[in-house]
Amino acid sequence: MCCPQNIPAAGRGKHLGFAWGPGDILVYETHLKPKEAKGPGSPFIHEVQKDEDIYSPILRKLFNESHHIFVGLQTIRDDLPSKNKKPQFVSVSKNYRSVIRACMEELQQVAVSSQDSQKASQYENQVSILLAIELIWNLCEVLFIDAAPAGSLLLHLLDWVRLHKTDDDVKMRDVLQSESPAAHHSYWDVPSGNQTLTEFDVKWRHWHEEIDRCLQDNSFASNQHLETICKILSGDVDTILEHKNLLSSWYHFLVTRLLYLHPTVKPTELHFYAQTSLSMFLETSVTEPLDSILLAAFEFDIHQVIKDCSIALSNWWFVAHLTDLLDHCNLLTSHNLHFGSNLREFLLLEYASGLFTHHSLWQLAVDYFDHCPEFGRVYLELQIERVPLDTERKALKVLRICEQRQMSEQVRSICKIMAMRALRNNRLGSALSWSIRAKDAAFATLISERFLQDYCTKGTFSDLDLIDNLGPAMLLSDRLTFLGKYREFHKLYGEKRFADAAKLLLSLMTAKIAPRSFWMTLLTDALPLLEQKEVIFSANQTYELMYCLEELTSSLNKTVPSPDQPMQDDEIEVTKVELLRLALARNLAMAIVKEGTVEA
């Protein structure tokens, strides 16, 4: 049921190379020239998608709606008695089928209204696939999930056929609504349809013998139509097959045959009638994939149904959800695969991996991985790293998913990627925020350095809200701690809390929190405090500032001046040092006088 993709070079004997992607394959022609190669080379690269359905807007609704049903199914408690869970499982199955039908109807409407014949054909193809899926699912519901016993089994099968052969419904309605139903041209076709047969089912035991007697007596010999109906009601297979044009398929023939021959058929007897009905109805021995799947279902071979569907269908949606439901019903025997996972988990992992290649459906896949206890987390960790972080909003979504599942390695990776991207775009605040979230001390130090360099260049801080609200995060690295405390100094100074500001400024240098390269800036910041009329720095604090200045100047004197550094910069530094020494000496004198006066 998959649509093949034509690659011209493959038909000309060319040597092809390929590269695997998460959801597709890139195929290209190589430089190797086999002898049998024909025609000119091709410069094109072909993208072969393994699952085109996820890119259909209408089928995306199927994936979204079924996701909600799947998540709800996982909440049904395992400890409930089977008799209590069975109605819930049947309800879940019907919910899945209703979603399939809704998508099918929408596709039919789009196919009819489409002006593009190629698009219309594509939609019709999708409708036929969904029809087959719903047919198989409904039969599995009757045989496996609802598990109807003998007696009611045939009634369920009649409903199954009725749901998938709507032309009889239309005929019946036209006949009954006409002025003279008996004179309607379709009157004699309708009784062989399944609606009327369902009504006959309750009474057939009472008049079956009478029908046989009437046939033997040739009571209806004068009316060919009545005689034909009586033969059908008596279960004459040859007569039913003579009117096979009124039957849509071999399984329609099967249910019709059972109704007239064996209405109390047991589930274990179905496979015999299914096999013989198939061979009787089909004129050829070649069967379609759908026939093989339905036959396997009638034989109660669940694993064969799943296997054949996996081969025939173009994606894993159907087999993944059906297998999950059957597994919840405890209908799948232990069927471990060679790598240790069970069948349910394998199919869910494959389906979810396909969803991860889509730009929005990847979010649904997370829940599927969550409910795969053995390999789900490993798959999620591998797949989540492949999600392109196109925007910060998307990155936050991915990050939230990882944080909720304690995926610390992935959290760090995402934050580092976003921090680097923000840094390249000179968005220092965002870069710092991401590095803090990643708990990356080295990167936080690097960005803090950039903040300080910007301050030295511009004289102001950018992203003040972030720096003001660092809180305990500033302890991530020494440089980040200094950045936060230095900003706190500016706030204290702005609030005219000069004593607190002076104390903090001094502690940044004496505790070695401030980088040595920033000491001159700090000492320069101390100048306005030293020039205040009121003494801010005490004598001891002034001595400590003098010590820091001398330590800084002595280290500067030892460094060899760079030839690239202009002489003007050296003169500015010398001027700063002289001004600081003068201000410190003046402040020390004032502090000694003040402290001596207080003591006296």
Image (cartoon, rainbow, N blue to C red):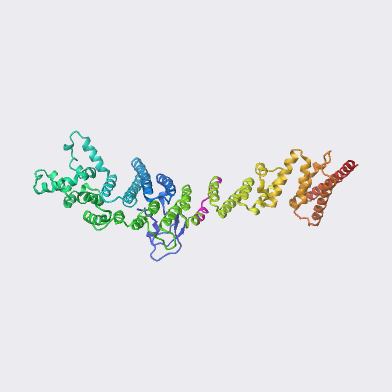
Provide residue 391's location: percent of width, then percent of height.
54, 46
In this view, 247 is above or below 16: above
Provide residue 372's location: percent of width, then percent of height.
46, 54
Q: In screen coordinates, is 488 left or right of 31? A: right
The answer to whether one can see residue 19 in this image is yes
Quadrant of the image occupied by residue 178: top left
Residue occupying image coordinates x 17% and y 45%:
206
Which residue ends up furthest to the right in the rendered image? 600
Q: In screen coordinates, is 370 left or right of 418? A: left
Q: In screen coordinates, is 73 left or right of 172? A: right
Provide residue 598's location: percent of width, then percent of height.
88, 41
**Magenta stretch in the rendered image:** 381-392
Question: Which residue is more in the foreground, 212 or 171?
Answer: 212
Provide residue 156's location: percent of width, then percent of height.
28, 47
Residue occupying image coordinates x 81% and y 49%:
571
Which residue ends up furthest to the top in the rendered image? 179
